[in-house]
Amino acid sequence: MSKKLKKSSLQMAAEAAEAYVPVDEDFVLDVDQDIQTDKNYASQGFWKGVITRFFKNARAVIGLVIIVLIIILAVIGPHTSGHGYAEVIKVENASGKKVLARSIPPRVPGLHKLFTGEEYEDDFAESTFLFGTDTMGRDLWTRVWYGARVSLIIAFVTIIIDMIIGMSYGLISGFFGGFTDIGMQRFVEVANSVPRLVIVGVLATFMPKGIWLVIVALLLTEWIGMSKIARAEMLKIKEQEYIMASRTLGANNFTIIFRDVLPNTIGPIITQIMFSIPTAIFTEAFLSFVGVGIVLPQCSIGSLISDGFTNITTLPYQILPPIIVLALLMLAFNFVGDGVREALAPRIEDM
């Protein structure tokens, strides 16, 4: 039955073609038509395909949403509580005496009354502390999001600078090759063999503790991975035909490296950045935790975890918010990094 239907449809199409009578409009040349461009192919650009594949990845989208939410809270969160990150909160009690809001667990008076039917009866009955307060009487909601802001700023600043340094170093090393490449790679091996804690210890003897010590420590260590990726891409690309054509046309080395090769290494570099940012955040947290990072009254994720760790047995609520924020940041950036890597180099079964 299907064969008969198929034959009949073909016969009908053939009969329609035979019955069609051409008209003059069928032979008019459209001079405005761009016949040099395959519009179907041009509408599916490389980066458009990357973005499409990225947003089809559920984990990557979840990670991106988490990162955006944390960045928004890091920007506006410290301004929503009405308390500064270094402000010691004091409340006037019924007798008119100022009472220090020290080590108060998380509380929201409205929710407490809604679920229990009772009101707080202490001096802070009308005060709201979403994350509680620390042992000094400072609002942890403000300090956690201010600390997240500091950690993110340190991570993004150092990664951008490391990207510029490492990418330039790797591209130059791979492009010139020979003794230049050998010498530059031996320097990378020496720099990579020095433990990070040794570098931090040396810096701590010459620099005061604080945000600049953390930034310099990250700058001295994080560029090496970028340089290796850039060098590998240069070695893969520099012998291709369009590079040889550019040389033949008289382009200088600087033009070839940064105009012809660099745009073709952006994909792997972006992937490396996505995995380097959580490493930088964790390193900052570790340095602040061991006491060589951010100093009071400033705070970061690491310093807040360090403060909460000292009271973990008696006041466990103090360490939970910064740990959760750090874990979400690490998880989200790794999800985004995996999504970017898969979007830039999709497997056949994913296409």
Image: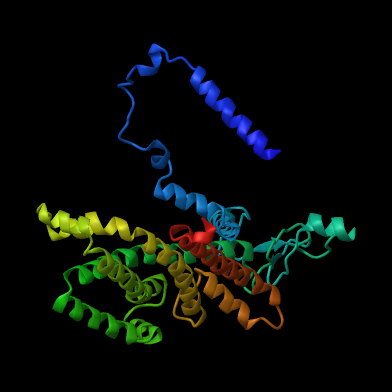
Above/below status of 212 relative to 78: below
Residue 280 visible (yes or no): yes
Judged left or right of residue 146, residue 112 is right
Taking depth in this image into account, of 252 and 135 the one nearest to the observer is 252
Q: Is residue 149 visible?
A: no
Placement of 258 over or under 2, stated as above or below: below
Identity of the residue drawn at 72% across and 64% down: 97
Say whether residue 248 is left or right of residue 57.
Answer: left
Q: Position of residue 307 (x, y in %)?
A: 58, 77
Q: Give the farthest residue toward the top.
A: 24
* Residue 335 picture location, percent across and down: 55, 64
Residue sitting farthest toward the right = 117
Q: Estimate the x, y position of residue 217 in percent, counting from the top left.
A: 36, 76
Residue 77, given in percent of the width and then of the height, sits at 59, 56
Q: Split into 4 quadrants, where in the image is the N terminus?
A: top right
- Residue 169 in the figure: left or right of residue 302: left
Look at 63% across and 55% down and name the residue there: 81
Residue at the spot 52% in from the left edge and 67% down from the top edge: 334
Task: Determine which quarter of the picture holds residue 223.
Answer: bottom left
Q: Residue at x 62, y 77 (%)?
A: 308
Colour treatment of the image: rainbow
Q: How many marks?
A: 0
In the image shown, does 31 or 185 lie closer to the viewer?
31
Q: Quadrant of residue 82?
A: bottom right
